[in-house]
Image (cartoon, helix red, strand yellow):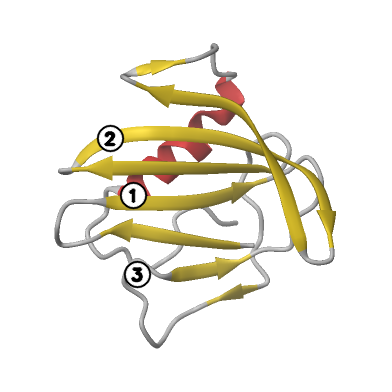
Amino acid sequence: MWEHGGMESNGRGTAFVIGNHRGEAKRPIFVRTDGRLACDKHALFVVKRGDIVVEAMCEDRRIGPVYIYRIDTIDNLTAMLSVINEFKNATWIEPVPEMFDNIINAAILKATTHHCRAPCYVL
């Protein structure tokens, strides 16, 4: 699974950031350093069941929805994710465990970084 994203010139951004089951940074197996990098794929990770993925979005340079997913299963190179929490209208649906603070902040940073060209959450 790829960490990817960034904010486009129009002020809209999205980011996908990957962590282990505790939301901690993982070591990528590959980091892109050339080619089209702006708001594209930056770091490739081997993922496993239980890993956490955070998707953050911004619109007009302001934070939009943020979703915390858990990888439930992996089958034929397809990861099945379930939403475990979401941030909408400036409120989390459920309290967020403190251990997810860093991965959430990394996803928000990536989604709001103009033409992000590098990974934001890696060992």
Q: Circle 1 sits in a helix, a strand or a loop, which is it?
A: helix
15 on left or right of 61: right
What is the three-letter code of the residue carrying label 2?
Ile
Q: Real-space Cα distance between discs 3 and 1?
A: 11 Å
- The answer to the question of whether label 3 and label 1 lie on touching residues, with beta carbons closer than 8 A, is no
The residue positioned 36% from the left and 82% from the top of the image is 36
Instruction: Report the quarter where the N terminus lies.
Output: bottom right
The residue positioned 37% from the left and 51% from the top of the image is 14
What is the three-letter code of the residue carrying label 1?
Ala
Q: Circle 2 sits in a helix, a strand or a loop, which is it?
A: strand
Within 10 Å of disc 3 (Cα), the crowding (few <14, some 14-19, many 20+) is many
10 on left or right of 51: left
Q: Residue furthest bottom?
A: 35
- The answer to the question of whether label 1 and label 2 lie on touching residues, with beta carbons closer than 8 A, is yes
Residue tagged 2: 63
Within 10 Å of disc 1 (Cα), the crowding (few <14, some 14-19, many 20+) is many
Count up the numbered dots: 3
Q: Earlier in the sequence, mark 2 or mark 3?
A: 2
Q: Real-space Cα distance between discs 1 and 2?
A: 8 Å
Residue tagged 1: 111
Residue tagged 3: 117
**To which quarter of the image does residue 45 belong?**
bottom right
Instruction: Report the quarter where the C terminus lies.
Output: bottom right
Q: Earlier in the sequence, mark 3 or mark 1?
A: 1
Q: Circle 3 sits in a helix, a strand or a loop, which is it?
A: loop
The residue positioned 56% from the left and 34% from the top of the image is 68
